[in-house]
Image (tube, rainbow, N blue to C red):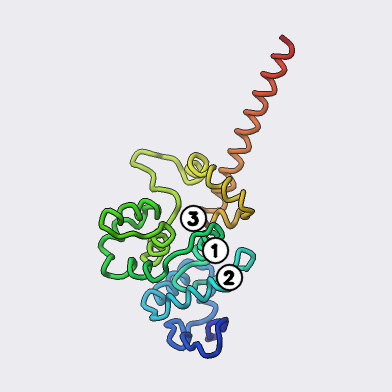
Amino acid sequence: MTTHTRLDTTPATSDWRTSAACQGIDIETLYSDKPSDQHTVQRICGSCPVRVTCLRDALGYETSTYQVFGVAGGLLDWQRKALIVHAQMGERPNVQQARVLASPVFAGFMREWLDWPADRVAGELRTFGVLASPVTVRLALWWCGGRGSVLAPLPEGDRRVQWMQVRDECRPVVEMLRGHGLSNRDIVAYLGVAFHNFERAVRSWRSTDASVQDTQTQQQELGVAA
């Protein structure tokens, strides 16, 4: 079994890593893509005294072109990738506020909203006099074990699967993100959906576009013929 020390990306005067709860954890577990290993590491992160510092450090060197992997600061790779996308959009979380929202003080509220999208939770918090940006709330939801997806839970009786919901609800935001030069994998992380469901939604959009184009062409040809 191999133990590790967190990647040194800050000046030598910083000794926060010596306080990290993950010190001594098998490095293969720390950077594993197995859900069971990831959940184990996230549980350790939940009680880590330097979780906020660890996350800030990771986001300091991870970029959209960096191969993000493993758990850092209590977040999975795709969650940190989503925060990178948010940052590219000029949206950065208040990490300290997210820590408070994920603390036992707010636990009773947050547990009721774990499946909600962050913007909806932010709206609910405002009714209690708490002002927090959606990206800050999204981080807090992840730390609480929530989905933090852009997609809202389907209402009772709605039998659509995830790719259908992406197809029906996400095209405007996808086109906006593409306009900022973001890759499909960046967009998938931002949405918080499975890549294959995103691909299927994109194929559906393309098929619809092609059908509309064919109809318009036929109408134009008929108009010329008339």
> Is label 2 in contact with label 1 (beta carbons under 8 Å)?
yes
Which structural element holds mark 3? Answer: loop
Q: Report which residue position mark 1 lands on.
A: 84
Q: Residues within 10 Å of mark 2 (few under 14, many from 20)?
A: some
Between the residue at mark 2 and the residue at mark 3, the CA separation in whole angstroms equals 18 Å
* In-front residue for pair 198/60: 60
Q: Report which residue position mark 2 lands on.
A: 62
- Percent across and percent down for residue 210 are 65, 32
* In-front residue for pair 80/161: 80
Between the residue at mark 2 and the residue at mark 1, the CA separation in whole angstroms equals 8 Å
Image point 44% across, 59% down: which residue?
135
Q: Please, what is the three-letter code of the amino acid marked with disc 3?
A: Gly
Image point 61% across, 52% down: which residue?
180
Q: Please, what is the three-letter code of the amino acid marked with disc 2?
A: Glu
Place residue 131 in its image quadrant. Answer: bottom left
Instruction: Give whichever of discs 2 and 1 has the lower sequence position.
Output: 2
**Label drawn at residue 192:** 3
